[in-house]
Amino acid sequence: MSNLHRAPRAWECAIVLLLMVWCITTPHLAWAAEFENPFDVNMNDPAALHEATRTLVEEVKLAARPQTYLLIDLAAKAVVLKARGVELHRLPIMEWSADSQEKMTGIFRLTVRPAVARRKVDPSGTEQEPISLTDMPASYDLLFSPPLALTVVSPAEQAPVRWSVLRMKRWWQWLNSQIRALASRSDTQADPSIALTLAENEAQSLAWSLTDGMPAIIRRTSPR
């Protein structure tokens, strides 16, 4: 029997082992009991099993610490805010595109998050109103380390001009990276980038949840 045919069985064992470790280490036993197939992976797809296992390995590292983190699940089309392995909030992705998925492994940490336009202070008032969810931007760019650019936009029908500008900006960044690579005569690929389209309220909710240095992991789609 070839290695390709043996791979699914090996990855199944790896996933089961990881889930056993997770169930032992998590304090949320009721949740852990439901963690049989967290990514709803096709067990007959070796590539999908490999990616799910890789993602789980990274998440175990993050779940071991008291922190919130992001799972950008391109395969399931969702951005998930989690802590200790527990899902806190799930944001459906309406549309997405990505470049250099092969570089989207490991843990990324947020270095640049969206700026918030603070309300003008009313001279006649005694206090400034606190920032609320509605003050959060619905379209913005996030930067991570190691290099990863994440662009979040709201649907074109809600903000057509802003959506078009951000799409053009992303295309221009890609073109510049290709020109630099050609100029240096190197085979170095551009830094990975992702563009997500979220509903306006979901994009604002994500911006509200972000903190400096927040870790993120990415589950990629299986190559076709």
Image: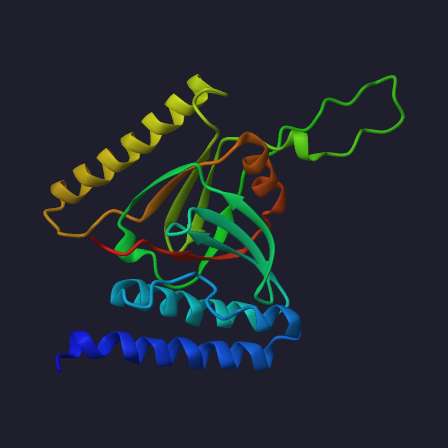
* Residue at 17% across, 44% down: 181
Determine whether, in the image, residue 203 is placed left or right of residue 99.
Answer: right
Determine whether, in the image, residue 123 is placed left or right of residue 4.
Answer: right
* Residue 139, placed above or below residue 110: above
Task: Residue 123 in the image: state x and y as whole percent.
Answer: 83, 18
Q: Quadrant of the N terminus?
A: bottom left
- 73 or 209: nearer the viewer: 73
- 115 or 57: nearer the viewer: 57
Numbered circles on residues, count? 0
* Residue at 53% across, 52% down: 80
Task: Residue 7 in the image: state x and y as whole percent.
Answer: 24, 76
* Residue at 61% across, 75% down: 26
* Residue 145, placed above or below residue 151: below
* Residue at 50% across, 81% down: 20
Determine whether, in the image, residue 196 is placed left or right of residue 182.
Answer: right
Task: Residue 58 in the image: state x and y as whole percent.
Answer: 44, 68
* Scheme of image coloration: rainbow
- 60 or 52: nearer the viewer: 52
Task: Residue 88 in the image: state x and y as whole percent.
Answer: 62, 55
